[in-house]
Amino acid sequence: MAASSEKLMSQPRSYQQFYKQSVSEPDVFWTREAARIDWVKPFTRVCDFSNPPFAKWFVGGETNLCYNAIDRHLATRADQNALVWISSEVEAQRTFTYRQLFDEVNRFAAILKSLGVGKGDRVLIYMPMIPEAVFAMLATVRIGAIHSVVFGGFAAASLAARIDDAKPKVMITADAGSRMGKIIPLKPLTDEAIQFAGHPPKHVVVVNRGLDKNIQYIPGRDMDYMALCHRHSGKDSGKDSTEIVPCEWVESSHPSYILYTSGTTGKPKGVQRDTGGYAVALAASMPHIFDMRSGSSPQFAETFFCTSDIGWVVGHSYIIYGPLINGCTTIMYDGLPVRPDAGIWWKIVEEYKVSVMFSSPTAVRVLKKQDPAFLTKYDTSSLRYLFLAGEPLDQPTSDWIEKGINVKVIDNYWQTESGWPILSAEPGIEDTPRKCGSPSFASYGYRIKLKHEETGLPVAPNEKGVLCIQPPLPPGCMSTIWGDDARFVKTYFSSFKDEQVYTTFDWATCDQDGYYFIMGRTDDVINVAGHRLGTREIEEAIQAHHNIAEVAVVGVADALKGQVPIAFAVVKNAAKTATPELAAIHEKEVMATVDHELGAIGRPARVYFVTVLPKTRSGKLLRRSIQAICEGRDPGDLTTIEDLSALDQVKQQVEN
Ligand code: ATP
Ligand code: MG
């Protein structure tokens, strides 16, 4: 007894030992980590994997996500800031202590209940980056309902498809968001989507920010949030306190939310997340991976700043649930990194003494185009780490920011499906040396396999393989595709005949020292005269040319060779491609670089020069759309594109 409790308490202090315990003694490991959250009823089994590939974590345990994010901190952190909202779009700032957040969430929970939302019902949240979106999410899980946040940048048709998949009882939206100071109406899109939808919600709660003066309410269906707040703040009944809505205790595997993948590679999948496993995974990742120390003592608080959007998985996990479960102060930033100027993020870091930041390589590349003086204008010495994820991180970008603000940069790799990093350094356990271009090692709990695409055999060091995870997937990972278990198994677990493994659909290599390198997506492979080439490899070769800032390569159908690579590049010095003659010379130079770096087989058939590449607003290259344009096809769903003119440039170049 004494020995086993000792084992539970003692946590290995080296990455190797920590990782090893997570995979060789998962019950010991996860029982220890599960103690980081509060359970109203203890679990009886760590993992039930009797029906592979479905895994149930912390079976029989009962808990609540909202309770862990708010209620349990009230005794010690009631007056500590929980949520700091900063908007450079509407030039406003609002701060909520844990006590105030508790009040807001309870009021929202009372509203949802009054609209008939109960355990297991879906609530669709289509909101800009405002605190009410956070209240709505926490209120939903408080009452055991399931939220489905749809990124506010999606247009009506995409929203309608998600409404029909999730079949929400209630939808929550706002009159409008704002981007670059321009009002982006949301309510008309909500109305349009509901018209398209086969399963319209019964009610729509509208947070009216007063940005769009023309919003229309549909009587009986639409409710004004402020009016509902008034009704539930006790003021009408003469009480002066907010209604308290008790947490609905749910079994660990009860779904907490549905989140659709960004759809870069096709029809979005409704990732379903559980409750207990997710809470434990986030509670553990904050100290171990992100080195956040708030949880270590009830009096101690640190600030976490994740620059993502609540519409993406990074926002769910690291703007909201992760930091709050750990008693941190979390920053929610509504705006662009360059408005009012490129110093805004560093100003926030200085003001709130941010300890750790989480952003994306794309955002850093945006800053890199600005005056570097902004990097030193503010005191950023509180910042220990900058985590970057979502896209491959190139060395120049990483070096630029690491030196610029004197912070350690940590590349980490994961997916909507995983909910938390699959590959990352874990400085909270051990500050292992990092290699540029590598998200380091497997996170604890992940049994990674690099499999040969055809044979399924493990690949040799430095040889490219498909990045797979041996099930059971660790706590926090998707439990299934919402409403479609068969699609879950078929999509993710059916790539190899020899064994049932989860496929990430990304290529990777692993070097002799155990560092992983992501080589791109498996469907970004092109077939040139029978040779299979990753577009990412060609992109890297092109980037070796000193004047290339960014590049996208796609495979385009070719009668002779099957496919040929075509490159679209952004140059650093535009003067070198200013005339058609200069561009032609530059194109030859870039081709010669590829010949040298990769071999003539990878040489692009054409290199076109553009000033901006088509990307989603989450920073992912829209290779599919570029490819479609090159082949004269429809570019597909462009509702989340950052800048439509980028696609026009591609069109112009190809047509010329
Ligand atoms: P869909 O699956 O619908 O096509 P998506 O894959 O773009 O959408 P996400 O789940 O947001 O949506 O993105 C995960 C993907 O992003 C990974 O599979 C990988 O391709 C890429 N990615 C994430 N982090 C990194 C990283 N650190 N380095 C390289 N690539 C990364
Ligand atoms: Mg994906």
Image (spheres, rainbow, N blue to C red):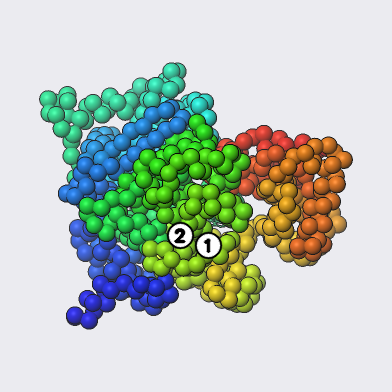
| Quadrant location, the C terminus | top right
Query: Which element type, helix, strand or loop, lies under badge 2?
Result: loop
Q: Residues within 10 Å of mark 2 (few under 14, many from 20)?
A: many
Q: Nearer the viewer, residue 17 or 186?
A: 17
Q: Residue at x 25, y 72 (%)?
A: 9
Q: Nearer the viewer, residue 2 or 563?
A: 2
Q: Amino acid at mark 1?
A: Pro
Q: Pointer 2: what residue?
A: 421
| Quarter assignment of residue 199 | top left
Q: Amino acid at mark 2?
A: Pro
Alpha carbons under labels 2 and 1: distance apart: 10 Å
Residue 312 percent across, percent down from the top left:
46, 46
| Quarter assignment of residue 176 | top left
| Quadrant location, the N terminus | bottom left
Is residue 197 placed above or below 56 in the rendered structure? Answer: above
| Disc sitting over residue 439 in the figure | 1
- Left or right: residue 90 compared with residue 238: right
Given this view, does label 2 or label 1 mark the residue nearer the observer? 1
Residue 426 appears in view: yes
| Quarter assignment of residue 143 | top left
Is there a contact, CB below 8 Å, between mark 2 and mark 1? yes
Q: Residue at x 66, y 42 (%)?
A: 613
- Left or right: residue 86 compared with residue 230: right
Q: Is the CB–ligand 1 distance for label 1 below 8 Å? A: yes
Q: Residue at x 62, y 36 (%)?
A: 643
Residue 283 percent across, percent down from the top left:
32, 58
Q: In which of the image's four quarters is ligand 1 placed?
A: bottom right
